[in-house]
Image: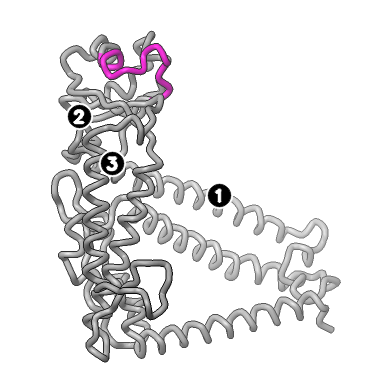
Amino acid sequence: MVDSSTVGLIYSAVIGIVVYLIFLVLFELLRNSRPHIFQFRKWIQDYEENFKEFRDENGEFLSYLPNQLPPSWFSWLTTPRKVTDEEIQQFIGYDACLYLISLKNKIIYFSIVAAITCVILLPVYGTAGDKAAGGVALLSMSNLETGSSRFWATFIVDFVLAYLSIIYALLECRAYVKRREQFRAESIAANYAVSVMDLRKDRNTAELVREDFEKVLPGEVDGVQLTYGSAYLRKRFNLYGAALNKKEVAQYQIDNGKDGKRPRHHTTPCTCCCTGTVDSQEYWTEEQAKNAEEIGAAQEKIDPKLVKPCDSAIVVFKSKKAASVAAQSKLFGMPLDSYTIKRQEAFKSVHWHGM
């Protein structure tokens, strides 16, 4: 007689598989019948003028324009497999590339683990002589007789899995190191700079920080920029992003609307008929430009009323080699050993043109 735990396991597996298949088919049907919903980002990326702001410090265009998915069933599952790691790295970024590589390695690793378990362990446990265990317990170690030589199968499989875990870790490390070296070899501003934190209050000026680094690398320091925290800038960045998204939605509605009317926007919280409206696409375009201008002005000229200095700075050097050496400057003693110094990352929030 099958025990209750086995029945519960079977029910859970069956229900899970059925629900998964239902949602898979529903998504496929809706994707083909509602392209304006499921392909909205594809449409947005076709409009290059909407992405002119998204360039790196070298002026390179950052948007990735994917190919149109074919109308065949489940093409959204097969088409992405044709995109190479190099394309993802070039158009999306290193973080996304490493994340997807890690996911693929995990799929391979756990598939091998599952195959070894099903091919070796389950038959070894299931054909053992002790039938006292019932249900799914027949496929576990509890079905083995005391002192059975079949225990060696578990030991050997554990050894193989440990070895595979080491290989998996090495593959992950190699992928990271390879792309880290590629990133540091690029001629971008971040590779010429280090991030300096934990500045002492008595040395929290650009001149004193530069003086400290000049002692270690004379003639190599190109500039020092103290960092500032600003709730005002964070708010402006959020408003800029919201305006950009709403402008894109308005443009989409213009191009795909059935009645041919341009969307309207209420400029006041009240949306009743007595309040005036403006063209939505034009309004959000102006809002985006206004916030971009205010962000640029705030970054170019620091207003003590809007920003507060932090105990950190970005030090820019004349060569990538000097920046690499400076990141290890704790080796040189006081006063630099009181700082926390790290290689600078290519954060979008850093206003490189203003440095």
Q: Nearer the viewer, mark 1 or mark 3?
A: 3
**For mark 3, what is the residue?**
346
Along the polypeptide, which appears first: circle 3 or circle 2?
2
How crowded is the residue under tag 2: few (<14 C-alpha within 10 Å), some, or many (20+)?
many
Task: Choose the circle earlier in sequence order: 1 or 2.
Answer: 1
Q: State which quadrant residue 199 falls in.
A: top left
Gap in angstroms between the C-alphas marked 1 and 2: 40 Å
User: How far across and down, in percent of the image, does residue 97 sit?
Assistant: 32, 55
Disc on res. 315: none
Q: Could you tell me which secondary element the residue under label 2 belongs to?
A: helix
User: Measuring 50% from the left and 52% from the top, which residue is drawn there?
Assistant: 164
Give the number of callouts. 3
Amino acid identity at mark 3? Ala
Q: Which residue is depicted at the point 21% across and 48% down?
A: 293
Asked if residue 118 is positioned above or below residue 179 in the image, the reply reads below
Task: Specify whether 185 is left or right of 342.
Answer: left
Q: Position of residue 351 (x, y in %)?
A: 24, 39
Task: Point out the image quarter for the N terminus.
Answer: bottom right
Instruction: Tell me the mark number nearer the camera, choosing from 1 and 2.
Output: 2
Which residue was labeled with disc 2?
320
Write down the region rendered in magenta: 197-210
Report if residue 135 lies within the magenta region. no
Q: Position of residue 340 (x, y in %)?
A: 41, 23
Which of label 3 and label 2 is nearer to you? 3
Residue at image coords 71%, 72%? 126
Q: Amino acid at mark 1?
A: Ala
Q: Residue at x 79, y 64 (%)?
A: 142
Quadrant containing the C terminus is: top left
Residue 134 is situated, as x and y percent measured from the top left of the image, at: 81, 75
**Residue, disc 1:** 162
